[in-house]
Image (cartoon, rainbow, N blue to C red):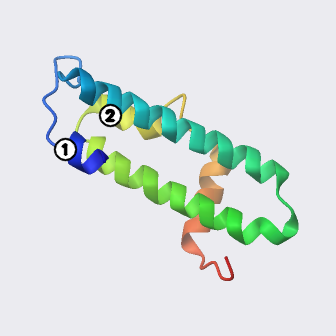
Amino acid sequence: IAKVFMTNMDLDERGKPRDRLQNKLRLSFRDFSKKCSDALNKNEQLIQADQVDYQKELKKNYLDFTNQLSEIMGSTRVEQKLVHAPPIQLHTHTVHALAAAAEGPVSNV
């Protein structure tokens, strides 16, 4: 959805899409990404030992999602904040865990 509707956006002087619906979609992706991050952090606190591999896969997929979203919206400073700045910014230990999960293979998920 983001690739179709958010590439080559016409931005105003503040770096926001001029089109009201594109801006609403941008904000929706921002909110969705924040909720995914919150859910991953909460899930990490609740999982059992047998769910660690699944959690790693979830983190890897979230990292892939945020990287793709950043590529689409990363053409301006405002959109780069979508994934890399508060309120979506992850704690340092979470970022390291996401990077580690992305490096290692996950089996039996």
Name the secondary structure under disc 1. loop
Q: Position of residue 36 (x, y in %)?
A: 58, 44
Q: Is residue 54 above or below residue 27?
A: below
Q: Amino acid at mark 1?
A: Thr
Q: Which residue is mark 2?
A: 79
- 82 displayed left or right of 107: left
Q: Position of residue 54 (x, y in %)?
A: 69, 68
Look at the image and tell me whether residue 90 can be seen: no
Look at the image and tell me whether residue 70 can be seen: yes
Q: How many marks?
A: 2
Chain-order first, disc 1 or disc 2: 1
- 79 displayed left or right of 99: left
Q: Position of residue 81 (x, y in %)?
A: 40, 33
Q: Amino acid at mark 2?
A: Glu
The residue shown at (40%, 53%) is 67
Q: Is residue 108 above or below residue 63?
A: below
Query: Residue 7 bears which disc, if any?
Result: 1
